[in-house]
Image (cartoon, rainbow, N blue to C red):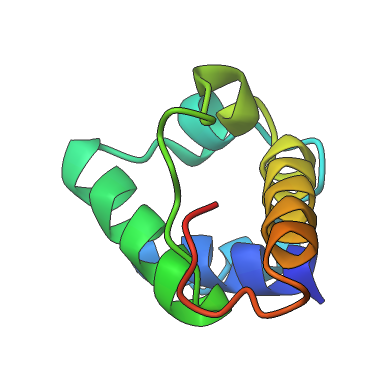
Amino acid sequence: MILQTVIKILSEIKESPELLSTLKPETDIINEVGLDSLQMINFVLAIEDAFDVEIDFDHFDIDHLGSVQAFVTFLEKERAAVANSTGGQAAGQPI
């Protein structure tokens, strides 16, 4: 589910519906999707809204954008860490 949501958000940010069928887990978000700086900000904001999280950039690295799957893995690990540290109540917590 997370993978499909990330792909949907990328497609919406790029205003490119065809990305829904062409983006793969191994697609490089920076070099292949080609988000500019404003689109990157909108992507992060949309991810935060979709998953009710706040991305903590102390834990974020540019390598997490190396592929769609790398970003999904980062998101899953951070959500799990927040859920574990808050007793399963991750809503609105930084990830």
Q: Is residue 66 visible?
A: yes
Q: State which quadrant residue 69 falls in.
A: top right
Q: Residue at x 55, y 80 (%)?
A: 91
Q: Residue at x 71, y 58 (%)?
A: 85
Residue 86 locus on image (x, y percent): 67, 68
83 displayed left or right of 29: right
Image quarter in which the N terminus is found: bottom right
Q: Residue at x 58, y 73 (%)?
A: 8
Residue 10 locus on image (x, y percent): 50, 60
Q: Nearer the viewer, residue 45 or 90?
A: 90
Q: Tell me how many marks there are.
A: 0
Q: Is residue 16 visible?
A: no
Residue 20 locus on image (x, y percent): 65, 70
Q: Is residue 78 above or below residue 6?
A: above
Q: Nearer the viewer, residue 50 or 23?
A: 50
Q: Nearer the viewer, residue 50 or 11?
A: 50
40 displayed left or right of 26: left
Residue 88 locus on image (x, y percent): 77, 76
Q: State which quadrant residue 80 falls in.
A: bottom right
Q: State which quadrant residue 48 falls in.
A: bottom left
85 displayed left or right of 58: right
Q: Nearer the viewer, residue 58 or 75?
A: 58
Residue at the far left: name it: 38
Q: Is residue 67 above or below residue 2?
A: above
Q: Residue at x 21, y 37 (%)?
A: 37
